[in-house]
């Protein structure tokens, strides 16, 4: 049987999916000069292959089936399996319709198809509900899949074959390192050392598909060794929402990387309260070059209302400073538009993001995603019926204190304040000359005052 695996490039804007927003995906359609640059960088650094499709390629090949890969071209095959997203579902279903016209049976996988099968089933022969390996193994063994097919989560993740990047994606031939950026141009290889998330943030979709499970340190090290055997000094992107959840396991993996003398660099995402100086040193010695984490809001009370445990400010600053001393790139995530937010609280979060001094910052608007606890609470406030607008950058609900236009202006202001300040370049280049810092600090204040005046004028026009 010939199996076509499709991870379609976005129909418009900069679309990222698979493990992004738990699998619902994100779409950035630039709405300012700064976000146009951010979009360009996302295109260059964040277009990485789908780890879910890598696993499915391995499963199909292990059962003796031919695997074909596509990012959008129509490919002849017996079965086509399409990676779904919320933000690009119309493009994905249109492609599925064309494949069915060519005689292929088509199925959808992923969080979006699992939680909103009604968007996909009219355009497909089957929709897999859940982590897809169990159902795809049944398909490979000759079972015919029709309608909505339940797929049970794999209890023992060590039992899965490693993703087959030779079948679904090769490392880009011109991937090159960029000074101080961590991730190289062309991206890297995604890797899941665990699945789901052990935390209980009500707005996050990462834990709505299956319970949290983790792989053994030895099993992850085996996959890393296989990557190193195939590729020279690979850059690995751990896609776990909380990579350092189990400290002992994390340290064991680092020591195994060093024991095997694996030549690689990697990045991970975690919580700052799951890091300390000693663990960072061990991670760095094993190859850590970038760490990303959620800060979300400066208000601890706001975070508690959405089930997120706040991390003390002193600890946040200490970890970021230690990462900077080690040359580790830091990327902080922020959410604007919590129900408790107003103009002043969002301005305070933006100011905090600037002062905290991470290498990069990503700002998004609060979005109530289907199947999350937040959705159940906020469904009556949702004003948007187009699921593709649930992209993280578009207001989709009636905020109690701010209009949609105000939220979008504040979001644009966050990117402008963070990236268009004189000190951003000195921070990025890790300059520590005292006189330079003093001069740039004065320039920062002047630029911030001008940006504030411009924002006030824009917000006045939005009222």
Image: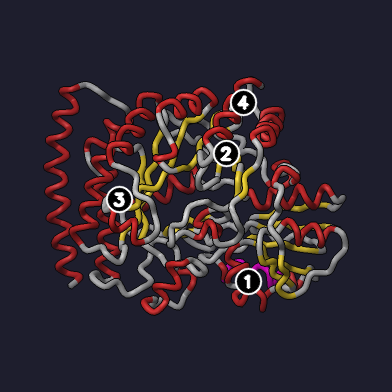
Horizontal and vertical percent position of residue 314: 28, 37
Q: Which residues are magenta?
A: 90-98
**Residue 415 has which mark?**
3
Q: Quadrant of residue 211?
A: bottom right
Residue at x 23% of width, y 35% of height: 423
The residue under label 1 is: 94
Disc 1 crowd, CA 10 A, few/some/many (<14, 14-19, 20+): few
The relative height of residue 262 versus residue 170 in the rendered view (above or below) is above
**Toward the viewer: 253 or 289?**
253
Q: Is residue 94 magenta?
A: yes
Q: From mark 2 to mark 4, how far is it between C-alphas?
A: 18 Å
Q: From mark 3 to mark 4, how far is it between C-alphas?
A: 37 Å
Kind of element beneath mark 1: helix
The residue under label 4 is: 257
Q: Quadrant of the N terminus?
A: bottom right
Task: Please report contact status of discs 1 and 4: CB closer than 8 Å, yes or no.
Answer: no
Horizontal and vertical percent position of residue 206: 52, 56
Disc 2 crowd, CA 10 A, few/some/many (<14, 14-19, 20+): many
Q: From mark 2 to mark 1, how far is it between C-alphas?
A: 29 Å
**Residue 188 has which mark?**
2
State which tag comes first along the sequence, 3 or 4. 4
**With 58 as the anchor, is 256 left or right in this view?**
left
Q: From mark 2 to mark 3, how far is it between C-alphas?
A: 25 Å
Q: Main secondary structure of the magenta part?
A: helix
State which tag comes first along the sequence, 2 or 4. 2
Kind of element beneath mark 2: loop
Q: From mark 1 to mark 4, how far is it between C-alphas?
A: 44 Å
State which tag comes first along the sequence, 3 or 1. 1
Disc 4 crowd, CA 10 A, few/some/many (<14, 14-19, 20+): many
Looking at the image, is mark 3 or mark 1 nearer the viewer?
A: 3
Horizontal and vertical percent position of residue 222: 70, 32
**Toward the viewer: 121 or 3?**
121
């Amino acid at each position: 049987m010939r199996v076509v695996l499709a991870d379609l490039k976005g129909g418009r804007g900069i679309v990222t999916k698979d493990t992004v927003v738990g699998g619902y995906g994100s779409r950035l359609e630039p709405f300012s000069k700064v976000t146009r640059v951010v979009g360009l960088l996302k295109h260059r650094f964040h277009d990485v292959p789908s780890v879910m499709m890598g696993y499915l390629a391995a499963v199909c090949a292990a059962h003796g089936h031919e695997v074909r890969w596509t990012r959008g071209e129509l490919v002849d095959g017996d079965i086509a399996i399409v990676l779904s997203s919320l933000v690009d579902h119309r493009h994905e279903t249109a492609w599925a319709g064309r494949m069915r016209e060519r005689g292929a049976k088509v199925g959808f996988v992923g969080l979006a198809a699992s939680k909103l099968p009604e968007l996909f089933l009219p355009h497909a022969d089957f929709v897999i509900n859940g982590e897809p390996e169990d159902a795809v193994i049944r398909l490979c063994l000759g079972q015919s899949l029709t309608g909505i097919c339940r797929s049970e989560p794999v209890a023992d993740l060590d039992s899965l074959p490693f993703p087959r990047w030779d079948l679904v994606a090769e490392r880009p031939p011109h991937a090159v390192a960029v000074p101080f950026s961590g991730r190289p141009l062309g991206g890297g290889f995604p890797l899941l050392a665990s699945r789901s998330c052990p935390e209980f943030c009500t707005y996050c979709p990462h834990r709505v598909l299956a319970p949290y499970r983790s792989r053994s340190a030895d099993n992850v090290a085996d996959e890393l060794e296989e990557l190193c055997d195939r590729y020279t000094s690979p850059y690995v992107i751990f896609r776990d929402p909380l990579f350092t959840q189990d400290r002992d396991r994390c340290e064991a993996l680092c020591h195994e990387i060093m024991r095997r003398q694996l030549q690689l660099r990697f990045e991970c995402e975690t919580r700052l309260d799951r890091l300390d100086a000693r663990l960072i040193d061990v991670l760095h010695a094993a190859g850590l070059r970038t760490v990303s984490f959620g800060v979300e809001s400066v208000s601890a009370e706001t975070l508690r209302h959405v089930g997120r445990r706040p991390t003390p400010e002193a600890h946040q600053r200490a970890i970021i400073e230690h990462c900077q001393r080690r040359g580790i790139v830091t990327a902080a995530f922020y959410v604007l538009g919590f129900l408790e937010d107003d103009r002043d609280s969002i301005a305070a979060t933006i100011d905090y993001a600037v002062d905290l001094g991470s290498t990069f910052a990503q700002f998004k608007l609060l979005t109530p995603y289907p199947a999350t606890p937040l959705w159940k609470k906020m469904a009556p406030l949702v004003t948007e019926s187009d699921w593709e607008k649930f992209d993280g950058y578009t207001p989709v609900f009636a905020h109690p204190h701010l209009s949609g236009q105000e939220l979008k202006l504040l979001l644009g202001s966050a990117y402008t304040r963070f990236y268009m300040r004189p000190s951003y370049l000195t921070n990025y280049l890790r300059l520590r000359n005292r006189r330079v810092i003093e001069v740039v600090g004065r320039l920062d204040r002047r630029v911030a005052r001008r940006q504030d005046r411009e924002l006030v004028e824009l917000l006045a026009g939005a009222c």
